[in-house]
Image (tube, rainbow, N blue to C red):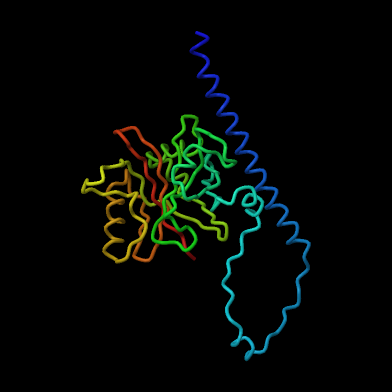
Amino acid sequence: MVLCLIPVGRSYYLSLKHQAQQEKLTDLLSLEKKHFEREADAESPETPIEIPEETQQEMPEVQEPVMLSRYSALYEENNDLIGWLSIEGMKIDYPVMQCEDNEYYLHHSFYGEEDKYGCLFVKDIADVDTPGTNFIIYGHNMKDGSMFGDLDFYKKEAFYKEHPVISFDTLYEQRTYEVMAVFTSQVYGQNDDVFKYYNFYEAKTPEEFSAFYETVKVLSFYDTGVEAEYGDTFLTLSTCAYHVKDGRLVLVAKRVTE
């Protein structure tokens, strides 16, 4: 009996450790946000400097991105940070990582410790800043509901209707996405001639875009009513599922633009 309780106790300990680390990260994020807001309130509005029109025409456009203040402290802790994903009313409220080793954050925490929870991450091919047509965020489907463990709830349309919006910030920009499709899939063999959602990052033609868009809409458990057209961009969340060997649960969301 004692031997049986050992793995249970270890699992509970790891869960608490993961929760404590997550609270540390969110606290750091909140403190940075409050600090930025206090500084913004303290600043008095400055009188704008008028620049002659001739000078404006000669001045080159400065397009260097500026990091959002709320993420500066976290980025100093780990330069692999590329964004933050959250869904209101769910446990999903995590940093998103990226490095050259696509397997690293499957088994390591934000602080580089070996950790079965890992981190949410994108592969090295993903470009979240520009971005292309699509990028994919991966995460473990944990039994305690952490990481992407709660995504299973999206199999039910009623749950989707209560949580239709996803927030994803890059280090430089706040973004909002609407859930468009939810479906199950799997990792196929290299030579299998089937739809492989995990290979889709860029639609070079309207036909490539339509092939992906129409397929995920057909595969979806229900019709969300969210439509897309060539030029729209997607965010895909991917986690393990257990309906088949190497199964995957997939959620595709479309970016909302003003």
- Which x, y percent locates residue 39? 75, 59
In the image: residue 172, left or right of residue 133: right
Residue nearer the viewer, 215 or 66:
66
- Residue 189's place in the image compared with 211, above or below, is above
- Which x, y percent locates residue 135? 42, 54
Q: Residue furthest top?
A: 1
- Which x, y percent locates residue 69? 66, 57
In the image: residue 127, left or right of residue 248: right
Residue nearer the viewer, 53 or 155:
53
Q: Residue furthest front?
A: 100
- Residue 160's place in the image compared with 210, above or below, is above
Q: How many circles with numbers are drawn on the protein?
A: 0
In the image: residue 138, left or right of residue 71: left
Name which residue lies at 54% across and 34% down: 114
Residue nearer the viewer, 227 or 122:
122
Residue nearer the viewer, 150 or 10:
10
Q: Residue furthest bottom?
A: 54
Name which residue lies at 49% across and 66% down: 258
- Which x, y percent locates residue 257? 47, 63
In the image: residue 60, left or right of residue 258: right
- Residue 48's place in the image compared with 76, above or below, is below
Name which residue lies at 50% across and 19% down: 7
- Residue 223's place in the image compared with 155, above or below, is below
